[in-house]
Each structure stands twice: as structure tokens, then as C-alpha cells.
């Protein structure tokens, strides 16, 4: 057992993890139609293609439900708030949402007195968000994101960890800890006990939020990135090898690179190779693009086509 990693990864009992919000079963078909209407290529990129041996390393350590990806027409989102009228709180939240804008071509702005496309509430239920284009199917009077109890008294570190994470879901990013490679390291029995004791989650919730790996055919990615902002902290006590997962505390360089690749700021920048446009290049990107899960990853040509199409 690695006690060092285990201790670093041990979550505080009062740290609330995020639960990804899913549309109801009867909305799933509409969600697919909406995703394809927003970005037709969402329909064409839900299956992996064999590696073509592309020499171009691409920042894809983060993962994405590419079937829920925004198109070039959705580059500015309005944000409204439910339940807290403090403008300084609202502006602080939006400033953290826009932290992604360092590399990502999507911007969030206050909806003023109107109803935003992103609607944030502060009620019970913890921290959650719908993913990507799914937010378009949420009733306009209902929130798309919840930040339970957020106030101006919350620390800046917590704003980074939570608001930036939930915003990642709005951008279409999934939980990094749902990667098969990480899920397979979790001891289910210990996880049920841990999340029941610390979060009050029943088995079904633990199954849905922690133990069910994402469909590998609907995500992009190469090696799991356990310090991604989209990754939970998981304690060593629930891991088969006793080694905890540190989890993300802020958008890391790989997240930034990935977001910039998914939503380039401009066509000109999109054509510039990663690493030459002010994006930190992770060490793991130094080598050739390795095979992804099951020896497959998305064709770089297909991804380029997707990017170009979204920039039109
Ligand atoms: Zn989350």
C-alpha cells in the first residue's frame, strides 16, 4: 500500500462529490436528436475507428461524450441564477466558468434579467450538472447546474475545484474517474460502504456515479488523467491496490489543451499544432500518439474534419 498517495487522496468527509445529471429515459431519444441537430457530427463520431498511425499527438487525456458536443454556433452561453440574487456571487461564479476560456473558445456571460441557457441553483442535492447538449432539453424553469450552498464565504480553492468541474460538464466533458482503467481498480464492496457512510449514497447511486465505466465507444481519450479537473478524489481504502486517486483541484494543462482542441478559439489557432499556441504540453504528449482503449483511438483525420466542420 502506498500510504503517501493514500493520505493525499483521502477526501475530507465534508467534501461533496459531483453527481452527473442525466436526462430521464423518455428524454434520451430527444437528447440524441437535439445533439445531432446542434452538431450533425455528433452522430458520426460515436464509434471509434482503428488507429491510422497518425504522427500527430493530440491532447486527449481528458474525455468527452462526443455525442453531446457543441458546435460553432454555440460559443457564448448566457447564465442565470435561481435562488440567490447577489450579483457579486454570480459574477464570481461566471469568472470561474470562464477560466476554461484560457484555451477554450466558449464564453459564459450573465443573462441579465433573462433566463440563461445555463441555469444555476444553490439548493440541496450537492453539486451536479447536465452534460453538453443535454442542457438544451432541461425545462427552462429548471436548473442545469447545482452548486449547493455556494456563497461568497466559500474558498477560492473550492470555487476552482467545483465550479470549473461543473462547467466542464456543461462543455460536454465526462468524469475522468469513470474510465474503465480507473473503475477496474475500485473494490465495489468497499466503495458501497465508503459512499454510504460519507455521502449517504445507496448502491444504485454508487453503481451509476462510480462503478459503471463509460461506454468506450462514446468517449475520446488515451491514458486516464487522475489529476484532471474532471476526476474525483478516490481514497485508497476503496481501491484494490490501496493507492488512492488524487483527483483534480483545478483545470490542469492537459484539460486546457483538450478543451482548446475540442473548441478552438479561432480557425487560425486550430490549425496551429498544440504546444505552439501557449498551451502547456504534458510530458505524456511528447511521444507519438499511443493507442487508446482496446488498441483503438479516434482517427486524427476524422477529428480534424470534425473540428473544421464546427468552425464553419
Ligand atoms: Zn462531475
Image (cartoon, rainbow, N blue to C red):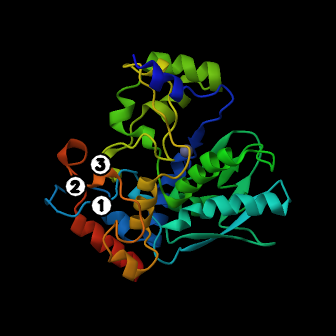
User: Would residue 7 be found to the left or right of residue 154 on screen?
Assistant: left
Picture coordinates of residue 137 (x, y %)?
58, 60
- Classify residue 223 as left or right of residue 83: left
Residue 94's x, y, as percent?
69, 62
**Mark carried by residue 289:** 2
Q: Position of residue 161 (x, y in %)?
A: 60, 46
Q: Do the residues labelled 2 and 3 touch (CB within 8 Å)?
A: yes
Q: Earlier in the sequence, mark 2 or mark 3?
A: 3
Q: Distance between the residues labelled 2 and 3?
A: 8 Å
**Quadrant field for ligand 1:** top right
Determine the secondary structure under disc 1.
Answer: loop
Q: Which residue is under mark 3?
A: 222
Q: Contact, CB < 8 Å: mark 2 with mark 1?
A: yes
Residue in front for this viewpoint, 310 or 300? 300
Is 68 located above or below residue 157 in the figure? below
**Which residue is depicted at the point 47% across and 54% down?**
173
Looking at the image, residue 231 lies above or below residue 169: above
Residue at 66% x, 25% y: name it: 13
From this viewpoint, is residue 45 visible? yes
* Residues packed near mark 3 inside 10 Å, few (<14), some (14 to 19) or many (20 plus): many
Q: Name the residue under label 1.
A: 58
Q: Is mark 3 on a helix, strand or loop?
A: loop
Single out the residue that lies furthest toward the right: 85
Q: Residue 292 carries which label?
A: none
- Identify the residue at horizontal 73%, vertical 43% (top origin): 148
Q: Is residue 312 left or right of residue 86?
A: left
Q: Residue furthest left?
A: 53
User: Vertically, is 281 above or below 228?
Assistant: below
Mark 3 or 1, nearer chain start: 1
Q: How crowded is mark 2: few (under 14 residues within 10 Å), some or many (20 or more)?
A: many
Identify the residue shown where x is 38% and y is 82%: 268
On-image quarter of the C terminus: bottom left
Amino acid at each position: 500500500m502506498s500510504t503517501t498517495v493514500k493520505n493525499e487522496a483521502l477526501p475530507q468527509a465534508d467534501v461533496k462529490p459531483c453527481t452527473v445529471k442525466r436526462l430521464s429515459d423518455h428524454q434520451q431519444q430527444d437528447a440524441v436528436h437535439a445533439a445531432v441537430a446542434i452538431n450533425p457530427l455528433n452522430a458520426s463520431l460515436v464509434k471509434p475507428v482503428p488507429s491510422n498511425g497518425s504522427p500527430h499527438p493530440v491532447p486527449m487525456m481528458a474525455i468527452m461524450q462526443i455525442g453531446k458536443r457543441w458546435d460553432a454556433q454555440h460559443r457564448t452561453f448566457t447564465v442565470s441564477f435561481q435562488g440567490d440574487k447577489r450579483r457579486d456571487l454570480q459574477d464570481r461564479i461566471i469568472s470561474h466558468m470562464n477560466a476554461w476560456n484560457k484555451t477554450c473558445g466558449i464564453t459564459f456571460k450573465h443573462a441579465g434579467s433573462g433566463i440563461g441557457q445555463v441555469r444555476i441553483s444553490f439548493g440541496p442535492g450537492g453539486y451536479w450538472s447536465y452534460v453538453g447538449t443535454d442542457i438544451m432539453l432541461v425545462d427552462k424553469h429548471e436548473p442545469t447546474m447545482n452548486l449547493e450552498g455556494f456563497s461568497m464565504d466559500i474558498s477560492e480553492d473550492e470555487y476552482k475545484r467545483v465550479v470549473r468541474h461543473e462547467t466542464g460538464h456543461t462543455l460536454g466533458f465526462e468524469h475522468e474517474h469513470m474510465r474503465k482503467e480507473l473503475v477496474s481498480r475500485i473494490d465495489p464492496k468497499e466503495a458501497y460502504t465508503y459512499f454510504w457512510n460519507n455521502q449517504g449514497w445507496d448502491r444504485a447511486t454508487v453503481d451509476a456515479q462510480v462503478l459503471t465505466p463509460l461506454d468506450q465507444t462514446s468517449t475520446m481519450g488515451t491514458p486516464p488523467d487522475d489529476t484532471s479537473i474532471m476526476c474525483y478524489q478516490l481514497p485508497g481504502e476503496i481501491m484494490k491496490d490501496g493507492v488512492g486517486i488524487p483527483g483534480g483541484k483545478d483545470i490542469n494543462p492537459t484539460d486546457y489543451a483538450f478543451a482548446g482542441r475540442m473548441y478552438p478559439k479561432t480557425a487560425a489557432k486550430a490549425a496551429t499544432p498544440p504546444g505552439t499556441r501557449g498551451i502547456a504540453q504534458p510530458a505524456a504528449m511528447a511521444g507519438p500518439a499511443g493507442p487508446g482503449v482496446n488498441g483503438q483511438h479516434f482517427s486524427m483525420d476524422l477529428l480534424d474534419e470534425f473540428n473544421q466542420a464546427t468552425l464553419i
